[in-house]
Amino acid sequence: MFLVTGLGNPGTQYSLNRHNAGYMLVDRLAEQAGARFERQLKRSVSCTIDCCANEAVLAKPLTYMNRSGGALLELLDRFPVPLEQLLVVYDEVALPLGKMRLRRSGSAGGHRGMQSVLDSLGTEDVPRLRIGVGLDGPPEDYPEFVLSNFSRADLSVLDAVLDRSCEAVNSWVCEGIEKTMAKFNG
């Protein structure tokens, strides 16, 4: 079993926010598999898809971005997988729009949702997929920027990177993170 958790903020008012790129990816994966987020836990929703003859649980914490770690602990209690079979997906302002990067481990890089995950798990050895949303402006504009919606032009670029990210998640389940990083981080 694998667990793919997309970070974001719940509610329709946030659905097109840059901060919800993680939600958007797991939504896309569920849509491609014909699955629906019907399984409700206390702090998250999830569904299960088949991927490379493996079961993959897709999950969205409902705790808001900066408190994602607690929801992830609940998910790991319900779906106990080793950390190498967990993938956390989130937005990344340090990557240009249209880019994505997989990493085996590392710091949160200033991302509060990922920091909550690392703090809750007590380790930086958490595989992650970062989806670039770009930041055109100074770092102090970051909070307002990530809570703003993608423009129509940005959405077409995002659409392509979400498709590529879905391929990367499938590769990660089938081939592991090293081969997937070599294939998709170029």
Image (tube, rainbow, N blue to C red):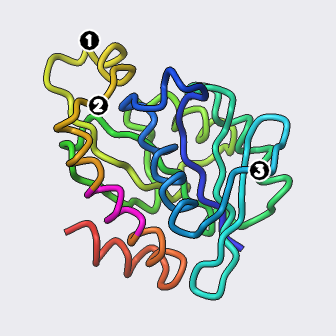
Q: Where in the figure is residue 119, as x and y percent of width and height?
A: 63, 35
Disc 3 target residue: 38
Q: Where in the figure is residue 9, as x and y percent of width and height?
A: 56, 28
**86 in relation to 53, above or below:** above
Residue at the image position 74 percent from the left and 40 percent from the top = 44
Residues in magenta, as a range: 160-166
**131 in relation to 146, above or below:** below
The mark closer to the camera, 2 or 1, is 2
**185 in relation to 91, above or below:** below
Mark 2, secondary structure of its residue? loop
Residue at the image position 52 percent from the left and 84 percent from the top = 174
Mark 1, secondary structure of its residue? helix
Residue at the image position 14 percent from the left and 25 percent from the top = 136
Disc 1 target residue: 140
Q: Quadrant of the C terminus?
A: bottom left
Residue 72 occupies which quadrant of the picture? top right
Q: Main secondary structure of the magenta part?
A: helix
Q: Where in the figure is residue 51, as x and y percent of width and height?
A: 59, 79
Residue 31 occupies which quadrant of the picture? bottom right
Q: Is residue 80 magenta?
A: no
Q: Please name the amino acid that badge 2 sits on.
A: Phe
Mark 3, secondary structure of its residue? loop
Q: Where in the figure is residue 20, as x and y percent of width and height?
A: 45, 35
**113 in relation to 58, above or below:** above
Residue 123 lies left or right of residue 170; in this view the side is right
Q: Please name the amino acid that badge 1 sits on.
A: Glu
Q: Please name the amino acid that badge 3 sits on.
A: Glu
Report crowding for label 2: few under 14, some 14 to 19, many 20 or more residues within 10 A (C-alpha).
Answer: many
Disc 2 target residue: 150
Label 2 – label 1 distance at C-alpha: 19 Å
Q: Quadrant of the N terminus?
A: bottom right
Residue 175 or residue 13, whichever sits in front: 13
